[in-house]
Amino acid sequence: MVEALDRHLAAALRGEAVGWPDSHDGFAIGAAWDRISFHGIAGLLAGRPEMLSDWPEELRRSILDEARVQAFWEESHRQMLVALLAGLAGRGVEPLLMKGSALAYWLYPEPSARRRGDSDLLVGKPQLATTRAVLAGLGFTRRDDPHGLFFQETWLLDTGIGLIHAIDLHWQPTDSPALQKVLRVEEFFARPMALPRLSPHARAPHRVLTFLHGAINQASHAADGYYVDEQRLYGGGRLVWAWDNHLLAGQFGHAEWAELTELAITRAIAPVVLSALLLAQAACHTDCPDGVLAQLSAAPQDTILVKHIQNTNRISAFQTDFRALDSFGAKLSFALGHALADPRHLRRKYPGSAGWPIVFLHLRRIAEAALRLRRIRAR
């Protein structure tokens, strides 16, 4: 049932003339809406009204209602981004928008069709203090982020109209030191792409780097889960990811295909890029050069970085990231940052022991981590 629904939804996104199956009872309608929500494609489907004409009225109404909510959120979020980017430009900060918001205003005819819950902003580390000051000046407050984030933080803005906008502020494209050797921050800033539909100050990373970044995020999220409306979901193959990959691949000429292939192979993530391309090809009928797919298929498949991207074991991931750091100081800071969690995090983690002295909570957490590591090594 799920596979058939997904094929039907993908065909509708492609604009193919497909009617609704005859057996559209209440369960099937509920299952269809669950898959639409999982895939994040209500806005995309609403942009294909001819595809929805013979769909069950209840399902069609849910899709259109969701699309209207997304459009309302988008307009409010756009106004926030325009003000933020102008404020940063006035202070000499030139950030990059990444992921969904960059794609929405770059490749999607209607930005609200690219469903997302926040915007990811990348700044150079020397500009971090200024960026924080601009965010605070616009009314943002920094969220109490979960323990384990080292190169990003979240800022929230309460609009007063029932919407809270989130900015994920990054000073590295990824929080993983191992993957920072693949997604290199200096390369992200070297060839920015303008986003004039959003703002004269809006820019995104180059299309090839954006594809690499998206492919890695998709593989990581498929393994470790991701949040939609505060609900943690698991599984890959989301159609909104396929559509992202499809639109980006459609921007590639010969030089971009060659660069994507070279980077994927030389940086040991060929299977991750291949998976993203195959997802787009299967769902969106993306035109991928045979030579590219063949080279990616022939590249080493079981690399350390591929295992790291797909890894769900946090201790093993820590070990890979720790080894990737170049200096003793960086290793020490990374280890201490993991070992010495914020007291607020510890009290949330151990609510039954929240009254303990904080040093004992630190020791408890370290002891549990050591025990897990011992079990892993014993396997």
Image (cartoon, helix red, strand yellow):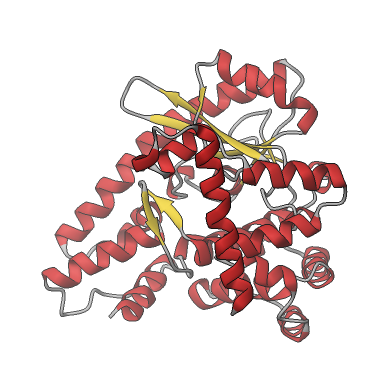
Which quadrant holds the C terminus?
Answer: bottom right
Labels in figure, total: 0
Tell whether 369 sits left or right of 157.
right
Q: Position of residue 92 (x, y in %)?
A: 77, 20
The quadrant of the rendering that contains the N terminus is bottom left
Give the image quarter of residue 181.
bottom right
Farthest-out residue, left: 26
Residue at 15% across, 58% down: 58
Residue nearest the observer in this picture, 296 or 150 = 150
**Residue 324, image x and y in percent?**
80, 57
Q: Residue at point 48% right, 39% down? A: 346
Residue shown at the point (61%, 74%) measured from the top left:
275
Image position of 77 with respect to 313: above or below: above
Percent x, y for residue 358?
A: 51, 33
Residue 266: tell me if it is visible: yes
State whether residue 218 is above or below residue 304. above
In this rendering, is residue 161 above or below 181?
Answer: above
Q: Quadrant of residue 375?
A: bottom right
* Left or right, 120 with reference to 96: left
**Percent x, y of residue 115:** 44, 49
| Among the 4 quarters of the image, the one containing residue 278 | bottom right
**In the rendered image of this protein, does residue 88 appear above or below residue 225?**
above
Outermost residue toward the right in this view = 327
Q: Is residue 247 visible?
A: no
Observer-nearest residue: 122 or 347?
A: 347
Q: Nearer the viewer, residue 35 or 10?
A: 35
* Horizontal arrangement in the rendering, residue 306 relative to residue 254 (left or right): left
Q: Residue at x 75, y 58 (%)?
A: 178
Taking the image as shown, residue 331 lies to the left or right of residue 100, namely right
Q: Nearer the viewer, residue 80 or 12?
A: 80
